[in-house]
Amino acid sequence: MFFVQSVAPLILYCCSAVLFILGFRRIRAGSSFKGIVDIMGAGAIAIIGWSMGNP
């Protein structure tokens, strides 16, 4: 249970941050649809990480 409530949310937050940065860079490069999809995915991953850390 330790992994699920402490380490797994941190891994998901890091993945979310990387995906957000990737989405922002895609928007700046001109591919706005893919960038918005990446940012929405980052938000979904962050919500999953938050819900795992706060049962």
Image (tube, rainbow, N blue to C red):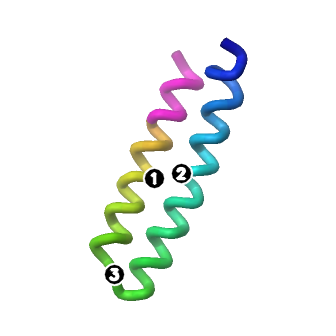
- Please, is residue 39 above or below residue 14 in the view? below
**SS label for mark 2:** helix
Distance of label 3 from label 1 (alpha carbons)? 17 Å
Where is residue 38, by image quadrant? bottom left
Where is residue 11, by image quadrant? top right
What residue do we see at 54% from left, 67% from top?
A: 21
Amino acid type of the residue that numbered disc 1 sits on in the rendered structure:
Ala
Question: Looking at the figure, which quarter contains the N terminus?
Answer: top right
Estimate how packed mark 2 is, as few (under 14), some (14 to 19) or many (20 or more) residues with alpha carbons within 10 Å.
many
Q: Mark 2 vs mark 3: which is more N-terminal? A: 2
Residue 9 belongs to magenta span: no
Distance of label 1 from label 2 (alpha carbons)? 4 Å
Where is residue 3, by image quadrant? top right
- Please, is residue 15 above or below residue 54 in the view? below
Residue 16, percent from left and from top = 53, 51
Main SS category, magenta section: helix
- Where does the magenta region start and end? 48-55
Q: How many marks?
A: 3
Distance of label 2 from label 3 (alpha carbons)? 19 Å
Say whether marks 1 and 2 touch (CB < 8 Å). Answer: yes
13 horizontally vs 42: left or right: right
22 horizontally vs 35: left or right: right
- The residue indicated by pointer 3 is 31
Say whether marks 2 and 3 touch (CB < 8 Å). Answer: no
Q: Mark 1 vs mark 2: which is more N-terminal? A: 2
31 horizontally vs 20: left or right: left
What label does residue 16 carry, if any? 2
**SS label for mark 1:** helix
What label does residue 26 carry, if any? none
- The residue indicated by pointer 1 is 42
Estimate how packed mark 1 is, as few (under 14), some (14 to 19) or many (20 or more) residues with alpha carbons within 10 Å.
many
